[in-house]
Image (cartoon, rainbow, N blue to C red):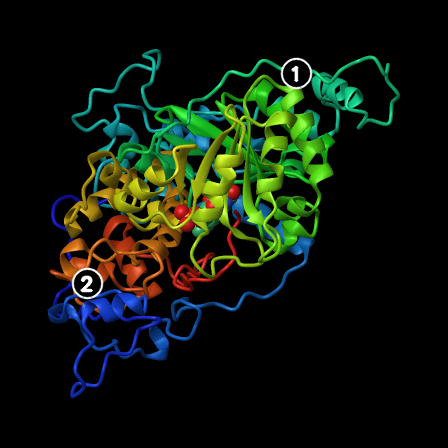
Amino acid sequence: MNGGEPPVDTATFEPSSENPISLPEPQAAPPNPEELVAKAIAPVKAEFLRPPPSRSRSDGAGEKNSVSSNVVKEKKSKRQLKRERQQEQKSATHICSEVAKLGKVDACRYGGKCRFSHDLDAYLAQKPADLEGTCPFNIVKELCPYGLTCRFASTHSEGVSLEDENTPKKNFEINGLNKDLQRLLWKNKVSFPKSSAQLKLLGLSVIKVDSNLKPHAREKKLIDFRRKLYLAPLTTVGNLPFRRVCRALGADITCGEMAMCTNLLQGQASEWALLRRHSSEEIFGVQICGSYPDTVARTVELIDRECAVDFIDINMGCPIDIVVNKGAGSSLLTKPMRMKGIIQAASGTVDKPITVKVRTGYFEGRNRIDSLISDIKAWGGTAVTIHGRSRQQRYSKLADWDYINLCANKAPDNLQVLGNGDIFSYHDWNMHISDCSKLSSCMVGRGALIKPWIFTEIKEQRDWDISSTERFDILKDFVRFGLQHWGSDNKGVETTRHFMLEWLSYTCRYIPVGLLDVIPQRINWRLPSYYGRNDLETLMASDSAADWIRISEMLLGKVPEGFSFAPKHKSNAYDRAENG
Ligand SMILES: Cc1cc2nc3c(=O)[nH]c(=O)nc-3n(C[C@H](O)[C@H](O)[C@H](O)COP(=O)(O)O)c2cc1C
């Protein structure tokens, strides 16, 4: 981490652009701002425009945003990988976490049988120099769990009066996967009495039941979504540190990244990690995705038993092929009876509110939700978020808010309807809220990724001409939260960097308010190449992966040897598939 003004090398700085919009020929009369807006080109003030930077092959151009040091990985057998892992674990770089934590060779109860190295001297001899800044745990007066492996170890307890371990923490995470439960899940030994009973009642179980029994209508603890600012679930980029950033900037409701039911039921740690919640997330839901009533019902029972969440959202809008081909996500929009089974089974199994997230329909021009909206309530859903696009349409064309409003107007009074699609300013928010009084609230996805202060703008009803330093401070917060979440050791630093780079592939789409002839910026505008008001602002506008890496290096030090990065979601393509 870096303190003070971020250092940008002004002498050499030359950002590059992946998809530059061609500027008009110098002799032609430049189009006026209204003409540009009509063509969905951002009307950047003439004095900031620049020719698209020339791009050498080595800075990532034409290489899918990956940097030049791309290493081609050879394919290895599982056995070879295991052997290598075992050798690596015993190497000096893989110090035992217990030994590192306390700085004592005898701290590990496994002694010589431990799989990891206990050679502290060898570890310290090869450890890279500490990063600039203070340990992210010491900042919040906590003992650093990474001990000597922390990349800020030299600042440990330096002038910080650490609170003793019994003091209740103000800053913590919950919803971890208990190891015993994980073992039981692996062995398929977990019982699901509530979901089994509900599935029997619904006739969705193989076991016959008394036909007089009625499906259990559970008393739901309602969440009032009305006018609350809801950060959309966002796979990869909507991670816990990012959600903390949005909470601090005004988001009221947050939701975890989509987790697949089958993976949760198999006890996969990486999937359970998607359910984690930070103490600052006041109203928090998790999002799950499954194809069948039984898997979804078991998953909600498990989540209800093991986790603290305020609601469980079922993703019925995910357009990606691997999900759709399994019969989950948006493919459910073509199977209303399966949809019914899933919602009834889930809502009858737990008292927690069950919400669903849908698209307008599966096929373009064949919207379904208006004909299902009353049913969703009758089946037990308490809220529905409608992303105003079909599955087929992906992100092409703007979201259809007329259709969202039509659905909201058709919905029964006790079903909360939330609209979603393309909100990028408080003007968009106000317009949608005032256009339809039946709409409870709206959800913000890419708008929050590109400018997380959108929540502040909506709350304070202003277009914030945020400075590059203020934006850099938000990145610093992300880094601090990331290191607290993923760890302040080498691995945590690199994981934080990776997720920050994913995020930076969105933030570069923001055009500062002061640079535009027409405000507010719209989410579908294509961006010309432009200079910022200072070097940092110019750097932040770059859509080159090499420049995102430079930003990451200002916060997290040099990237390791052979580092490469290619964003998972290619954000500068307007029409691409995402999970909702
Ligand atoms: C990177 C990315 C990841 C997403 N992941 C999810 C997800 O996990 N679950 C989901 O329901 N929708 C997901 N979506 C869809 C968004 O939640 C939202 O519905 C969509 O982006 C439209 O809203 P927007 O125009 O405000 O971005 C994702 C979208 C993006 C851009």
Q: Earlier in the sequence, mark 1 or mark 2?
A: 1
Residue 5 falls left or right of residue 545: left
Residue at image x 49%, y 60%?
576
Going by the picture, which residue comes out furthest to the right?
208
Image quarter of residue 507: bottom left
Q: Nearer the viewer, residue 139 or 319?
A: 319
Looking at the image, residue 1 sits to the left or right of residue 234; the answer is: left
Q: Nearer the viewer, residue 178 or 531?
A: 531
Dot 1 surroundings within 10 Å: few (below 14), some, or many (20 or more)?
Answer: some
Q: Which mark is residue 317?
A: none
Q: Position of residue 386 (x, y in %)?
A: 50, 42
- Pair 1/2: label in front: 1
Q: Amino acid at mark 2?
A: Thr
Residue 63 position (above or below residue 548): below
- Estimate the x, y position of residue 336 in percent, counting from the top left: 69, 40
Residue under numbered circle 1: 217
Residue at coordinates 35% horizontally, 37% vertically from top-left?
433
* Residue at the disc numbered 2: 538
